[in-house]
Image: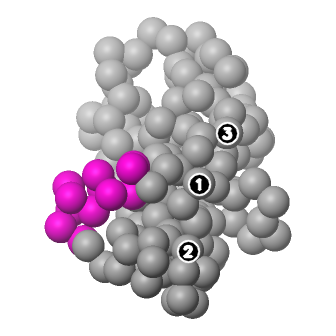
């Protein structure tokens, strides 16, 4: 966990890889709960028997479930002290190059791309790459934007 003392110190890290989160196991229960929360009950996510005969050989996490893990995982990589708050502003680009089979372990690497003044604080852009243990391709690559309010 990297800790930055304010936005000024964080600014010195622009263009660098800040580190990787610990591993997180994506369980079938987590997938099922996400399916219930989003009303996306496609069989590739929630039907282990049918999914065993499908293209992935097992159930897989929703792409948006993987994306929803980004804040949790990134917060385990770094934090900025002295802020009133930090707000997710959105994503510039998101891709899901590979699936996340149920029971997989994932972690996120974070690169700080830029910091720029904005109307409500400082806009922070990070490239977050979520990898699956043992896989040769990332499962999610997202360029996230946060507003840091001093």
In primary-sequence order, the first of circles 1 and 2 is 2
Residue at horizontal 45 percent and vertical 9 percent from the top? 82
Which quadrant, please, contains the N terminus?
top right
Q: Residue at x 59, y 82 (%)?
A: 56
Foreground: 99 or 123?
99
What numbered label is drawn on residue 58? 2
Q: Position of residue 69 (x, y in %)?
A: 46, 47
Q: Residues within 10 Å of mark 2 (few under 14, many from 20)?
A: many
Q: Residue at x 81, y 60 (%)?
A: 134
Q: Which residues are magenta?
A: 29-40
> Which residue lies most toward the front here?
49
- Viewer-nearest residue: 31 or 79: 31
Nearer-the-camera pick, 30 or 88: 30
Residue hosting label 3 = 23
How far separated are the C-alphas under marks 1 and 2?
Answer: 10 Å
The residue mark sitting in front, 3 or 1, is 1
Which mark sits nearer the N-terminus, 3 or 1? 3
The quadrant the C terminus occupies is top left
Q: Which mark is residue 103?
A: 1
Displayed quadrant of residue 137: bottom right
Q: Secondary structure at mark 2?
A: loop
Q: Is residue 128 above or below residue 3?
A: below
Q: Main secondary structure of the magenta part?
A: helix
């Amino acid at each position: 966990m990297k800790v930055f003392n304010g936005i000024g110190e964080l600014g010195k890290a622009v263009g660098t890889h800040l580190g990787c989160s610990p591993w997180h196991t994506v369980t079938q229960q987590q997938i099922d709960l996400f399916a219930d929360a989003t009303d996306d009950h496609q069989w590739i996510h929630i039907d282990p028997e049918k999914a065993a005969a499908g293209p992935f050989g097992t159930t897989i996490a929703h792409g948006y479930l993987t994306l929803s893990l980004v804040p949790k995982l990134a917060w385990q990589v770094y934090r900025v002290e002295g802020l009133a708050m930090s707000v997710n502003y959105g994503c510039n680009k998101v891709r899901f190059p590979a699936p996340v089979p149920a029971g997989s372990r994932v972690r996120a690497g974070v690169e700080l791309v830029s910091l720029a003044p904005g109307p409500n604080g400082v806009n922070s852009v990070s490239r977050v790459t979520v990898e699956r243990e043992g896989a040769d391709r990332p499962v999610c690559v997202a360029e996230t934007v946060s507003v840091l309010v001093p």
